[in-house]
Amino acid sequence: MIRVNVFPGVQNLPLFAALAKGFFAKYRLEVELQFTPNSQAQRDGLAKELFEIAHAAVDNAVAMVEMAGADVVIVLGSDRSMTQLFVQPYIHSVTELRGKIVIVDAPNTAYALQVKKILLLNGLKPGMDYTLLPSGGTRERLEAMRQNKDYAASMFFPPYSFLAEREGLRSLGLAVQLIGPYQDTGAFVLRKWAQANEGTLDRYIQAYVKSLRWALTRANKKEAVEFLAEHLKLDLDTAAEAYEYARDPVAGLSPDARFDVEGFKNVLALRAEIEGQWGGKVPDPDKYYDLSYYKRALATLEGEGGTDG
């Protein structure tokens, strides 16, 4: 049994497909999927060994290492950031967020750092020019903006970005267009667990990548859309829109869940600049990830041949 903890979103399509199509079972794995309400709950849960694998913005793994002293390691990529900055209809530019409330998950990781950087590029500093308010995960933040029009902005990823747009919220752009390359979602684990369960982790990655290949194959769209609709409680039209976004070669899921080292360097650069971590100097990125498991898993898959199981 492997317990896997995630945020609701289209980035989990490979997990939904692997459970439904038996990819995990093929690799002798039983996986329990959990949704987390926010990143602090996820980070605390991983540290307490309440589950084995977390899939989320990998800056959370860096935060666990640097802020909580937890020995975690990133082992797998997923996407290069599908987040967009959304604002209420009465906001027309980033500069109009002066004096407003911007809602985030944890105020010192991942998408909060993205939005801080975007606003800083427009001359706005948190605590001085706007208020940063922790309000839960993406699904919870969208609901908060529905209920309270004083919550002026937040970062959303699919399918919640589609729902936000349909409800009249305005996108001011993709994060990667506004701040540059970014390694977003990935899998991270406690290093001691990875070392003690090397074969299990290798098989998990094999099943994940094989499921990703299956899910992004156009011929499997109908089933994949149904999995998204079921797990994320979406209508089929929204699920289909999310699926097409997931297949986008630039903004969607990374082929074979590759980890973008250059994008990850920008993750660290944001933390150094915005949070003043490491005295403002970007550290060696190698200490935060170990791709040996991924490389072995991919080599095994290539040896098996085929892409869709």
Image: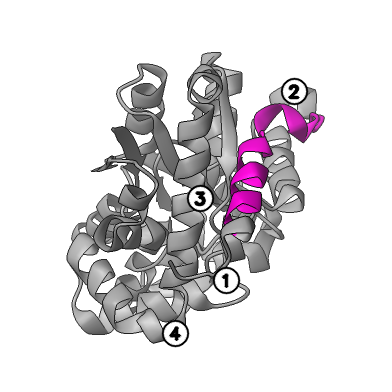
Which residue does the numbered mark 4 point to in the structure image? 218
Decide whether residue 293 is among the magenta residues: yes
Looking at the image, which residue is at 64% across and 63% down?
Answer: 176
- Which label sits on residue 278? 2
Q: How is the image coloured?
A: one colour
Q: Is residue 117 above or below residue 239?
A: above
Foreground tag (2 vs 1): 1
- Tag 4 and tag 1, C-beta contact below 8 Å: no
Between marks 3 and 1, how big is the CA–CA gap? Answer: 23 Å
- For marks 2 and 3, give the CA distance: 35 Å
CA distance for labels 2 and 1: 30 Å
- Locate residue 191, reporting x and y percent: 55, 21
**Which class describes the residues within 10 Å of circle 3: few (<14), some (14-19), or many (20+)?**
many
Which stretch did the figure color magenta? 281-301
Where is residue 55 shown, x and y percent of the image? 44, 43
Question: Could you tell me which residue is drawn at 25 percent across and 68 percent down?
Answer: 227
Q: Residues within 10 Å of mark 4 (few under 14, many from 20)?
A: few
